[in-house]
Amino acid sequence: MTQTMSIEPTAAPAPPHANWETLGGDVRALPCSDNGEALYRFGPAPLADGRVRFSLWAPDAAAQGQSVRLEIAGMQPILMSQGDRGWFEAVTACCHGARYWFRLDDGTTIPDPASRAQAEDVHGASVFWHPSDESGYAWRHVEWTGRPWHEAVIYEMHVGLHGGFAGALRVLPRLSALGITAVELMPIAEFPGARNWGYDGVLPFAPEHAYGTPDQLREFVDTAHGLGMMVLLDVVYNHFGPEGNYLPSYASRFFREDRQTPWGPAIDFRQPEVRRFFTENARYWLEQFRFDGLRLDAVHAIEDEGWLPQMAEHLRQCLKDRHVHLVLENDHNDASLLRSGYDAQWNDDAHHALHVLLTGEHDGYYGEFNEDLPGTTPSGPGTPALRHLARVLGEGFAWQGETSPHRSGDADGPLQGREVRRGQPSGMLDATSFVMFLQNHDQTGNRAFGERLTTLADPDALRAAVALQLLSPQIPMIYMGEEDGAREPFLYFTDHPPELAQAVRDGRRREFGAAAAFSDESRAAQIPDPNAVETFEASRPHCDDTDGYCRAWHHYYGELLAIRRHEIVPRLAGTRSAGVEILGDRALVARWTLGDGSLLSIWLNLGDNPVPAQCEASTALHSNLLPGGIAALTGGELPPKCCVTCLHRAKTGTHHAHLSHH
């Protein structure tokens, strides 16, 4: 990439809403349009005359009086014109697939931070890719408008472990046949190397080149739509990865000097350009790839200045002819966001309570679920973990404003002993505002050895918990491999340069070294190396339909999802809790009045002994045990390691009994 001479820029038409930043930066004021792409400020934008506008927000370069050049492979460099607020622009002819980059006065070459595709990796050239190009992918299911949220059965998937977009596409028919209605992809934005969970991405608009081309991603989404499945995308707006992030060198205003996150300086959402960057990113995935929704990673690390609800409103205004679903990961349990344009939140409280009940573990944040909520004085039966689960099933969150010991500071720590309250009241929210899971990438992969519940929990107890998860009114999410009873671990893996890889390796071993289980150095030394190819390969689930063990698990999931599809989903709208009753130390019954007036009850006993209980045989839908589970319950007791689901249908209902057992 050598520089010879510069071409002066041609006159560039004013970008859309060029003065938007000076009007307060409320993203609800950004324009909507059918073709969308021509209105994007970040990234290459094709114009009506056939030329392309390239833009770069480089306020540091502008403040220092530097120039910026656009360099397109095979063409002479173009000196970009400087506009207001640190913007540089150039308009030129450019072919689809052309490689380009920006060059600063000091010779530094940088990829487009809004690159639509990368030729190689995060340090290489960007590629001009425009989805309307005639040579691109032709959509086959243009009539698809999505599915209502209450129909969602989510399957979280890591694309790389399936061999990229083309490999992941091949598993879609099997997932559809199982009863999955929404596939959620872990982050796919360009990250360093070829192996990563995706949360180290630094180019949020570019699909990871190691997974395939943008058109292959579009084919994946289109194929899922043809099978009746939505596709959700996990996006990371709270940080950039540690390798390949060039923004601090020319746009330091992207970050705050006064706020730190676990991943470095906080992104500064006070800046209008920052708010627009991520709003355009959300629209880009939804518009140009036809994703049906987004899962926003760790929004508790975003000091958003009102941006989160504004963005949700903007997206729904621009895409009002489709179902668009927005899901949060939010450790703060901020119920107000679930009334401000967001459909649901991952329910960590449900996971933690069930994990403690299934495994007995109480290290780290699980400790809070092995103790009662601060300020409560429980009476009667039930372990603390069961009481947390009871609140989750009845009200959504377990933590609704109580002081969290795990998050509060030590007297000599950075929080100086300050108490941290977690959560807000959530009982007024719909049950479908919560996504329930037994495993996900975080809760499995952030364990030192990535163990799955199949290797940690009693098999019958696990089946009982799966029945609760898949038949409760909360939205169920399955992590890849669960549906086959996978026993392979899911490990943390990366593909970093040697120095960064060693830092990650050391940091991970230090983190686990604080736990008593790893006080022995020989035990800590067994923690898999995240950067080793073997760690990545060990994380692939290998179950298939020729294995009897896997086939039995797959049948069990399919059986439960069929009941959900036929009996629960048609009645979900308007569902309200009818209370939760604790039956024993590890047993309860949760009841819901469904939208048609029917009464759903789930009787769960994860303990070792039967407990008194009663359910009419005519209302029983399912038991994880053999028919004896239903017979015992109708006879007055709930067996150990058992879940029985009953539905007392409203008299006006037209649904017929569907008795099932496993």
Image (cartoon, rainbow, N blue to C red):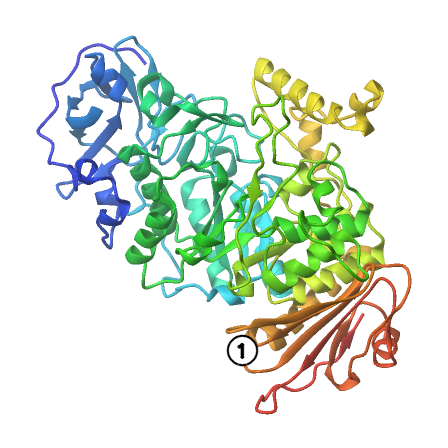
Up/down of 195 relative to 32, above or below: above
Where residue 560 sits, quadrant-wise, is bottom right
| Residue 570 x, y percent position in the rendering | 55, 76
In this orientation, does residue 544 appear?
A: no
Figure quadrant of the N terminus: top left
The residue at the point 29 percent across, 39 percent down is 276
Looking at the picture, tell me which residue is in the foreground, 439 or 28.
Answer: 28
| Residue 640 x, y percent position in the rendering | 87, 64
Where residue 307 sits, quadrant-wise, is top left
The residue at the point 74 percent across, 49 percent down is 355
In this orientation, does residue 410 appear?
A: yes
| Residue 28 x, y percent position in the rendering | 26, 49
| Residue 165 x, y percent position in the rendering | 52, 44
Residue farthest along the left direction in this orientation: 11
**Side of 73 where 150 appears, left or right:** right
Q: Dot 1: within a 10 Å radius of its alpha carbon, few (fewer than 14), some, or many (20 or more) residues? A: some
Looking at the picture, tell me which residue is in the foreground, 423 or 63.
Answer: 423
Say what amino acid the circle numbered 1 marks. Gly
The residue at the point 40 percent across, 62 percent down is 323
Total numbered circles: 1
**Residue at numbered disc 1:** 595
Residue farthest along the right direction in this orientation: 609
